Every structure is written in structure tokens, then in C-alpha cells.
Amino acid sequence: MSIIQPEIEVVDRATQSVRYLEHGWPTELCRWHSHREYELHLITATRGKAFVGDYIGDFSAGALFLTGPNLPHNWITDEVYKKPVEVRDMMVQFSQGSLDRLATAFPEFLDLRPMLTLAQSGIEFVGFNPTFAKGHLEAIRDSKGPERIVALLRFLIRVNEHAEKKALSVMKIVQPEGSSKQTRIADVINHIVANYADDISVELAAQRARMSATSFSRNFQAVTGHRFVEFVNRVRIGQACGMLYATDEPISSICYDVGFQNLANFNRQFLKMKDMTPSSYREFARRELVSSGARAS
């Protein structure tokens, strides 16, 4: 069995709570990897494919992303770019613990929490001004000590204000907090993620949330942004993506392993969500991830 695992990156938090990095292309730093820190990442040149969790999508110069802790990611420039690029990526890494302690002292910073929770799935800030983003990252790069912390917070406040935040992966699921209804919906989400292959009906989910089917459907869509069946299919397709590029299991077996009852529906839902067939996804993801430095064992 061929397994593609993300490389684990470790940051020394004893010496720096905010870490700035930039690099060109090509470089060994561009690889399928994950780390415990959040990463705010600006692409400054080229275009290609973004891999974030189970998400595969296009990127171009000016794209701004935020990835959450332990969410594998990589950005792969298209092969048409033959000449080296001096700076393709500007990024800053920071920890959950640092922001939690800051919010304890200054509760106003709790306003950032919904964005950071959404970042567990990865966020693209669609339409964010790239010149503005580059200026903020340069301010972080060029400052030290408390000034660097202030520069990061200023940037986080600005991106939090940006209206169009596109969630990318279903590998990490948003855990809403607040009302008891949201808590019960979150319990259903956890159940779906843990038992995605089971027969999960709206009626059974509503019973678990202690709501009527009508009330549950309305509240579920309000919390997740998806109808119940659509959400279950997204989770199942997300699981299938991981199995497709991490194992040699036949596509027909993966279809049933993730909870679909027939191959035709699985193929139809996969194409709808990923804009490619399962076999194309497996071929593309393996080729791109392995060729970019992902480690296979």
C-alpha cells in the first residue's frame, strides 16, 4: 500500500511566538506538510494548484490563505513557469495558545475566534487586496519584538473584516460555539465525521439533536451553510479523497467504504464537488504531491 503522509514541521516556540518566512520557486520548502501553527500565506508570483487538506483548487499571484493547526497544505506552481522566481511566497506563522492568552487579557480579541475556527478547514480570502496584504507582511518581516506582535494583530484584524472567506477542506469541520442549538448541531457534526460510512438520515440526526426534522434541517443549514444530505456527501467525498491518494484501494471499494450505496451516485457527487472524476483525482493528486516532494512510504 502506498501512503502519502505530510511532512511534520516543528517551530521552536521558545524563541519566537511569531515566525515570518518567505521563499522563491522552485525550492525544497514547497512540499506537502503540516505544523501546529496557523499560517497566513500570500502567493506573490506564478499560478498553479493549491492543496489544502482534501481541497484542490487554482491559485494565482495575490491569493491569500489561512490554514489552521495540523492541516496539510502545499502550493504547486504550474510547469509552464520555467525560470526561477525570487519570491513566490510570503507567510507568517503563529500559535493558538498565544492568541488564547491574549484574549484572556483582552476579551476584544475573541472577535477573531470564528475566523480561526473556520481556518481549521483552510480559508481563502477571495478578492483581498494583494498590495495591502504584502504591505502588512513586510511590516511583520521588518519588525521585531513587541512591534512584530502588533503588526501581526493589525493584519489579523484586517483579514477578519474581509467579507468573502472561502472555506476549503472538509478534513477539518467547524465546531460552532454559542447557543444550545448550535452545540447540538455540533454534536451531530462530530457524529457524522466519526461515523460517515453509516446510514445517517435526517430523521436520526434530528433525534440526536433533540429537534423536529424541520427545525433541525433549518438550524443545520444555518450553522454549516449546507443542506444535511449535501453536508454528509461532502464529508464522505472528503474521506474518499484521502483514501484515493493515500491507498491503492479500488475506487469501487472506496465508494462503499465511505458510505455511498452505488458507484454511479459516488462518481456523480465526486465530479460535482471536485470537478474531476475519482480516478483523475487520484492520478493528479499523487503526481503533484509526490513530484513536489511529498514523502511516500
Image: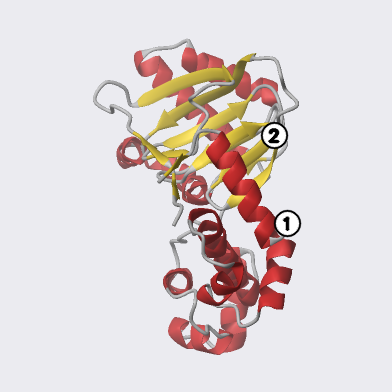
Which is more N-terminal, label 2 or label 1? 2
User: In x, y percent, where is residue 118?
Assistant: 52, 50
Residue type at mark 2 is Gly
Please tell me whether mark 1 sits on a helix, a strand or a loop: loop
- 187 shown above or below 109: below
Q: 10 or 127, which lies in front?
A: 10
Quarter of image, res 26: top right
Q: Can residue 219 be seen in this view?
A: yes
Contact between labelled residues 2 and 1, with CB atoms less than 8 Å apart: no
On the picture, is 190 further left or further right than 139? left
Tell how many labels. 2
The residue lying at 68 percent from left, 20 percent from top is 131
Q: Residue furthest left?
A: 14
Quarter of image, res 83: top right
User: In x, y percent, where is residue 109?
Assistant: 43, 39
The residue lying at 59 percent from left, 65 percent from top is 237
User: In x, y percent, where is residue 210?
Assistant: 45, 85
User: In x, y percent, where is residue 199?
Assistant: 52, 85
The residue lying at 30 percent from left, 38 percent from top is 101
On the picture, is 268 further left or further right than 96? right
- Residue at the disc numbered 2: 48
Residue type at mark 1 is Met
Please tell me whether mark 2 sits on a helix, a strand or a loop: strand
- Residue at the disc numbered 1: 276
Q: 24 or 243, which lies in front?
A: 243
